[in-house]
Image (spheres, rainbow, N blue to C red):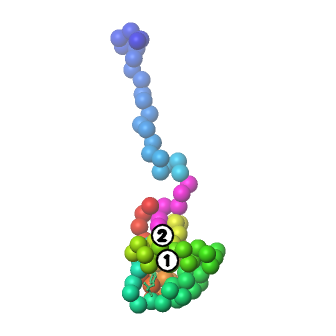
Amino acid sequence: MPPLGESIETVPKRRTEREFTTEPPYKVILHNDDYTPMEHVIKVLRKVIPRMNMRRAVSIMLEAHTKGKAVVTKCHKELAELYQENLRSEGLIATIEPD
Ligand code: TYC
């Protein structure tokens, strides 16, 4: 223990994990519905999302189908808004949320 008066020290505020992470900040979420054919969902995912392969598209579609929703991708806000708009314009239910 330092003598009284010498213990004054500035403890830096602990920075949150988010400040250090390079993770993209937004999630694009696909929601299930009762009427869209599975093939259409897969086709739209592959059309709208860059580098979406068949295996991932099927997996995301099935997750939304069975669980009600699935994360399609994570990216920055403006891109997430664009993907949401393009998924919606193809008849799918999509939302975005901060990750
Ligand atoms: N539930 C749809 C069906 O049974 C398929 C579907 C899956 C629709 C995922 C939307 O996001 C979705 N035809």
Which residue in the structure is indicated by mark 2? 71
Q: Is mark 2 on a helix, strand or loop?
A: strand
Q: Nearer the viewer, residue 39 or 76?
A: 39
Q: Mostly what secondary structure, the magenta segment?
A: loop
Task: Inspect the magenta stretch and tell me whether residue 68 lies in it.
Answer: no
Q: Which residue lies furthest to the left in this view?
A: 4
Specify the farthest residue to the top. 3
Q: Is residue 58 something one can see in this rendering? A: yes
Is residue 24 magenta-colored?
yes
Mark 2 vs 1, N-terminal side: 1
What kind of element bears circle 1?
A: helix
Q: Which residues are the magenta region?
A: 22-27
**Which quadrant of the render holds ligand 1?**
bottom left
Task: Classify the position of the C terminus by image quarter.
Answer: bottom left
Q: Looking at mark 2, is its residue's CB closer than 8 Å to ligand 1?
A: no
Q: What residue type is labelled 2?
A: Val
Regarding residue 94, the answer to whether it shows in the image is no
Determine the CA span between mark 2 and mark 1.
Answer: 11 Å
Is residue 12 or residue 20 the one in the foreground? 20
- Residue 13, compared with residue 61, is above or below; it is above
Q: Which residue is drawn at 40% across and 12% down?
A: 1
Q: Mark 1 points at which residue?
A: 62
- In the figure, residue 95 lies in which quadrant? bottom left
Above-or-below relation of 73 to 58? above
Under mark 1, the amino acid is Leu
On whether ligand 1 comes within 8 Å of the CB at mark 1, the answer is yes
